[in-house]
Amino acid sequence: MGFFDFLKKDKYDLSVLFSEDLVTLAQMTVHLNEVCRRNTHLIAIIDERPTTFRSSFLELGGENDSVVIDILMPKYGNRFIETSSKVRIDYTFEGVMYYFETRYIETVSGRFPSIKIAFPGIIKKIQKRGSFRVSPPIDNPILVEVMEGFTEEIADISEGGISFYTHRSEREMGVGTIFEKVTFKLPTIDHPITAKAIVRLFIQGSGLTIKNKCCLEFISMKMHDRDSIAHYAIVRQREIILRTRGEG
């Protein structure tokens, strides 16, 4: 049975995927089936350790009583999860950030090494679509090449776009200007992201030493690159929270 056939049969429409907290078994099953089908990236937080671990959703368990994820990276996280008492899974689906709490069940070494975790009791929404934005740390900046020979540091980033400060003029960066290949590399992935973007806002700075602020909206980007930005946002959000608590 196809995904949309499942929705039709059970009288659910696509809004179930993007509703508020998912609380019923049917809601969570539909949601997680699609999350697994896309091999959505996730962040695993084990026993509230400050270090997070990367993985991906693979499939639901045979009776929809568990969720199978890929092994954790860095690999030493796989030792931690086997002795854990609590695991939190954070991920982004269609630009919306979610999390659920679970527990480790077993490590599976069948077709491929994987980890089986308990099916969630509830899936909580963290952030609405397109509204979550983070700033890179000063000691680990992200550079963006807007066009050949024109590179700036990103001030903040979300799945929807980026902003940066520049000495370039409004004549060069006016609202409506389109850049065909905006390229940057996140510290959480090993390949550059390239997107088509448009200037949505240009804020004029005052004085010779004050830079102008330019805000770009992505208008064409691969879905897995959007997922990578969402993944980075989760990692960076956690860094900020831990630093605020004095744990970072």
Image (tube, grey):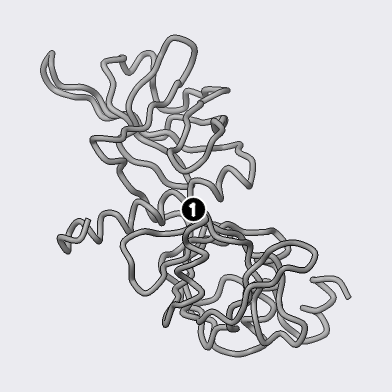
Q: Is residue 218 left or right of residue 170?
A: right
Callout 1 environment at 10 Å: few (<14), some (14 to 19), or many (20+)? few
Q: How far across and down, in percent of the image, does residue 80 sit?
A: 45, 69
Q: Which residue is located at x 71 percent, y 70 percent?
A: 59
Which quarter of the picture shows residue 149? top left
Residue at image position (83%, 84%) is: 9
Between residues 207 and 91, which one lies in front from this camera angle?
91
Judged left or right of residue 136, residue 74 is right
Mark 1: secondary structure: loop
* Residue plotted at (47% across, 32% down): 185
223 shown above or below 178: below
**Residue 133 drawn at (x, y percent):** 36, 50
The picture quadrant where one finds residue 235 is bottom left
Residue placed at 42% from the left, 82% from the top?
A: 85
**Quarter of the picture holding the C terminus:** bottom left
Q: Is residue 225 above or below residue 100?
A: above
The extreme top residue here reads 149
Say left or right for 213 vs 42: left
> Which quadrant is home to the N terminus?
bottom right
Quarter-of-image position of residue 168? top left
Q: Nearer the viewer, residue 107 or 138?
A: 107
Residue type of the residue flagged with mark 1: Pro
With 5 as the anchor, is 87 left or right in this view? left
Residue pointed to by mark 1: 74
- In this rendering, the answer to whether 180 lies above or below 76 is above
